[in-house]
Image: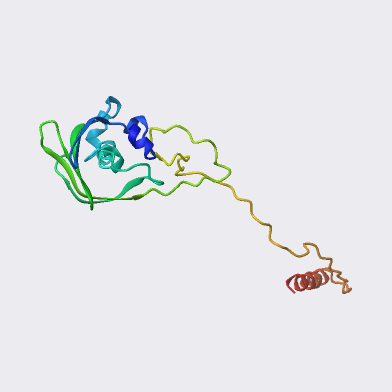
Amino acid sequence: YRRLATAGLAYGPAFRLVRAAWRDGARTFAEIDLPGTHVAEACRHRIHPALLDAALQIAHPAATGGETGPALPALPFALGDIRLRAAGAKAVRAVADHAAAGATVALHDSDGRDVVAIGAIRTRPAERVVASSALSAEAPAASSDGPATGGARPPRLHETIWAPARAAAVGPTTAVIRLDSPGGRDPVASARSLVAEALAAIQA
């Protein structure tokens, strides 16, 4: 995880599930297991997201020393040829096969039975997080919610940011209308006439 952090990926405690890892040529092997606080959640998933994320971590070039401090770290954004063989795994043994065109990952349980296989992993550089002046505080330590990239402050999924609105140009808001009583003995008819005259002036 120090090597991944050097490449720009700082994982929080909940996602540091790789207990041991070793390399054999172009392949990386790893032992991955859920912490006690997450074991009860395994039965709710076909494959627990944290286990899958840890398997993708060993497929990252920096995990094997194949990436030396890029300006923007590469992250998996497309997975293909996925075959799920078993559900509810709490611990797995993973093998990542690195190739020029990409990487593949296979997960097995402690008895060697297939759990899931990913036949195609595509990566691309992470977009740099550009914080606005209102959010440009010092970057905090990595949280348990996943990786923070590039040393920048992680983006927030739901947040209200107020932006000042420009006042629209408006005309006069007050007008004076002179109404002269038409006279006569019928006050109702006079009032009706004045109202009609005022309405016509407003709508003009």
Q: How many marks?
A: 0
Give whichever of 112, 170 is nearer the camera: 112
Give whichever of 149, 36 is nearer the camera: 149
The quadrant in which the C terminus is found is bottom right
Q: Give the quarter of the image for residue 52.
A: top left
Q: Residue at x 33, y 46 (%)?
A: 75
Q: Which residue is drawn at 48% across and 33% down?
A: 140
Q: Does 18 sit above or below residue 203? A: above
Q: Where is residue 14 in the image (x, y as percent from the top left)?
A: 33, 31
Q: Is residue 40 visible?
A: no
Q: Given the current orientation, which residue lies at the most extreme top position?
A: 36
Q: Residue at x 59, y 47 (%)?
A: 162
Q: Where is residue 173 in the image (x, y as percent from the top left)?
A: 77, 62
User: Which color scheme does this rendered protein use?
Assistant: rainbow
Q: Where is residue 40 in the image (x, y as percent from the top left)?
A: 25, 29
The quadrant in which the N terminus is found is top left
Give whichever of 159, 185 is nearer the camera: 159
Q: Is residue 172 visible?
A: yes
Q: Does 49 sit above or below residue 176? A: above
Q: Position of residue 166 (x, y in %)?
A: 66, 56
Q: Is residue 74 left or right of residue 184?
A: left
Q: Does 101 sit above or below residue 148? A: below
